[in-house]
Image (cartoon, helix red, strand yellow):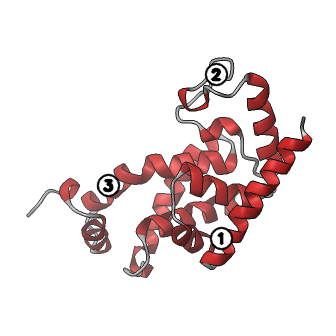
Amino acid sequence: MPRPDTLSDAELLERARQGDQDAFRVLYQRYARRVYGFLRAYTGDPELADELVNDVFLRVWKALPKYREQQQFLAWLFRIARNAAVDKFRRQKRRAWLGLDALLPGEDVDTTTPHPETAALTQEEYQRLDEALQQLPETYRTVLVLRFLEGLTTAEIAQVLGRSENAVRVLQHRALKALRTKLQNAT
């Protein structure tokens, strides 16, 4: 019998559905960092994101019997993550804001030292971009984070948001347009 860490996601999911905790642990190890990155970008709060990761995987474990194999696991996982964050904000009655530092890898971002991915940005440009992102509606931020941070396809984002692919394309277009407008107005 092959080791769980050598199996495909589909094989791990099937084993986890049968109660194999080792298989589920491997899924957790494969995806917890990506879920954390998404939640950090979505909430703008590293501590809350860390807390929510555990909640997300608990929800995944409980929902495994409902998982349909024709769904893409990653899209299903991000949908659960988004729903967990929304539920948390509803309970806390606070608004989620996306911080630009959440878009960058690593725990703490020193905005005085350019990150390799943003080396071309000056401190002033970085602040303008951060402010513009914070002003975008939640749905726009979600689409931008899933597309450009997590690298999900339009089809996967559609599954996460429960919308059609065309609706996601329109949202992405509008989100980028809104971001450009906010950046132009900030000058």
Displayed quadrant of residue 40: top right
Q: Residue 159: x, y in percent? A: 55, 74
- The earlier-in-sequence mark between 2 and 1 is 2
Res 25 label:
3
Report which residue position mark 2 lands on: 110
The image quadrant of residue 44 is top right
| Residue at mark 1 | 168
At 35% across and 52% down in the image, what residue appears?
30
Q: What residue type is labelled 2?
A: Asp
Residue at 77% over, 63% down: 174
Relative placement, left or right, of 159 versus 111 is left
**Label 1 vs label 3, nearer the camera:** 1
Q: Is mark 1 on a helix, strand or loop?
A: helix
Q: Which amino acid does label 1 sit on?
A: Val
Q: How crowded is mark 1: few (under 14 residues within 10 Å), some or many (20 or more)?
A: many
- Nearest the eye: 8 or 45: 8
Q: Which amino acid does label 3 sit on?
A: Arg
- Left or right, 42 with reference to 63: right
In space, the residues marked 3 and 2 are separated at their CA atoms by 33 Å
Q: Is residue 37 above or below residue 23?
A: above
Q: Quadrant of residue 92?
A: bottom right
Mark 3 or mark 2, which is nearer to you? 2
* Residue 172 screen position, x and y as percent: 69, 62
Q: SS of the residue at dot 3?
A: helix
Judge from the rendering whether residue 54 lies leftward or rightward of residue 158; answer left or right. Answer: left
| Residue 118 visible somewhere in the drawing | yes
- Structural distance between the alpha carbons of marks 2 and 1: 33 Å
Q: Which of 144 and 24 is in front in this view?
A: 144
- Residue 20 x %, y %: 25, 66
Q: Is mark 2 on a helix, strand or loop?
A: loop
Residue 114, relative to residue 57: is it above or below? Answer: above
